[in-house]
Image (cartoon, rainbow, N blue to C red):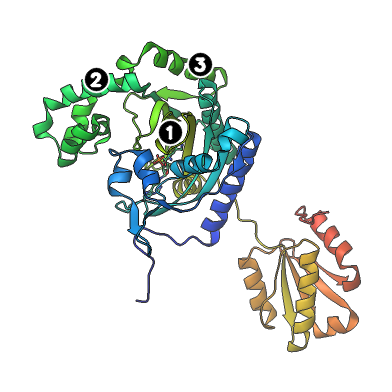
Amino acid sequence: MGIIAVKGTNDIYNEQAEGINYIEELFSAVCNLYGYRRMDTPILEYTEVFDRSSGDSSDVVRKEMYTFLDKGNRSVTMRPEFTAGIARCINEHKLYATEELPIKAFYYGPAFRYERPQLGRYRQFLQAGVECVGVDSARFDAETICLAVSFLQMLGFEQVKIKINSLGDEASRKAYREALTSYFSAHIDSMCEDCHERIKLNPLRILDCKVPHDHELAEGAPKMKDYLTPESEKRFYQTLSILADNGVDYEVDDSLVRGLDYYSEVVFEVSVLSSAGQDYGAVMGGGHYDGLLSALGGPQMAGVGFAFGLERLYLLMKDKGLLGEPEGLDIYLMPVGEGVLDEAFALAQIVRSLGFSCFLPDKSGKLGSQFKKAERRKAKFALILGEEELSRGVAQLKNMKTQVQKEINLEDIEDELDEAFGESQHHHHEE
Ligand code: HAM
């Protein structure tokens, strides 16, 4: 075997590449509708960006980061998520001082986590997400959730249900951590190695433990909602009522705590089962944060955001038949005879300049095999250029679906293509 891709990484090509591109374009469009602008931060950050922001108790930061020393002996990390880098960027360029608040940024691209690869879980994966930074309001929390739901609906998902919870403010979480510590202390001897650490670092993390025995114990643990301060409780219900008023279907989930440490107040996730009932894990997760910018040396400013996992989203869309047919080519150009190759090249350039996609093979070939290739490329029309045709300044334009063939004058190619594509209702020509 030759050289293969790094474990946990994926090559993305053909239908999957087209599907993911479609998802990214729709995501950009929905973000624009909500007044978001693209923000692109580097994949590589100084390690402290994640150390300081995502906390010491998250598995992502403690165990899963791709961290190494560069040639100048600086510790750098390939981003395990985007939020910390966006916060670093807002701080570094003081965008909070020059832009209208909230700053609304959207992004998509690769992220890296050293996890055990399995279906829907990779070491390099794609995220698409938003951050809304600089205004501390239940309304922006709700708007962010509305955006995520609109996006899923525009992709064709029906009955999107958001799982939602509140982690409360600092005081709420402190009281809750104490309650969890005393609850789990009574059982800690029977729990897994990781939970022995979690109880010291952050007992909330135990609620996420996948070990069946520990998971059972977690179900009997005290509930966050009983420890929310009156302010946090009020804020949570305000968010929920905005969502209800705007037709967002949600389900409050006591056990939702999220895997990164920067969250406070509202947190949310969406998981969708495949038709066969398979669980690829959450397609989206997010929430509100208060101390992220300040932890990175910036001002005390709140934010809210989420990220989708695009491979999971793609798998689900494929499973549910939401991807549709790939576009295919407008024109498969068929040179017949070695003497027409230069003219065919020039003709392909003209066709493309008119706004029609066109594939030209490298050599002349038998018509039968050229038609097979054109079908495989889902071409709408074949444009056949033979030596005899060339001498008369014409070509044959054949509709691949109806099989109707027409001789066209190359001097009138623009009108001929407009007419042909107008009739076949796949008019791509940009005026
Ligand atoms: P997260 O829940 O860690 O949140 O990741 C968001 C989504 O990324 C997950 O729901 C999942 O779909 C996808 N994902 C995560 N890890 C993997 C993996 N190993 N393989 C494939 N997909 C994966 C965050 O990253 C936060 N930054 C979201 C956020 C933005 N919170 C506030 N603002």
- Between the residue at mark 3 and the residue at mark 1, the CA separation in whole angstroms equals 30 Å
Residue picked out by circle 3: 241
Q: Earlier in the sequence, mark 1 or mark 2?
A: 2
Residue type at mark 1?
Ser
Side of 191 where 326 appears, left or right: right
Q: Earlier in the sequence, mark 3 or mark 1?
A: 3
Say what secondary structure mark 1 lies in: helix
Say what secondary structure mark 2 lies in: loop
Residue type at mark 2?
Pro
Residue picked out by circle 1: 294
Residue type at mark 3?
Ser
Q: Earlier in the sequence, mark 2 or mark 3?
A: 2
Q: Quadrant for residue 171, please give it.
A: top left
Side of 354 where 5 appears, left or right: left
Residue picked out by circle 2: 222
Image location (x, y in percent) of residue 278: 37, 43
Q: Nearer the viewer, mark 3 or mark 1?
A: 1
- Front residue (pair 314, 382): 314
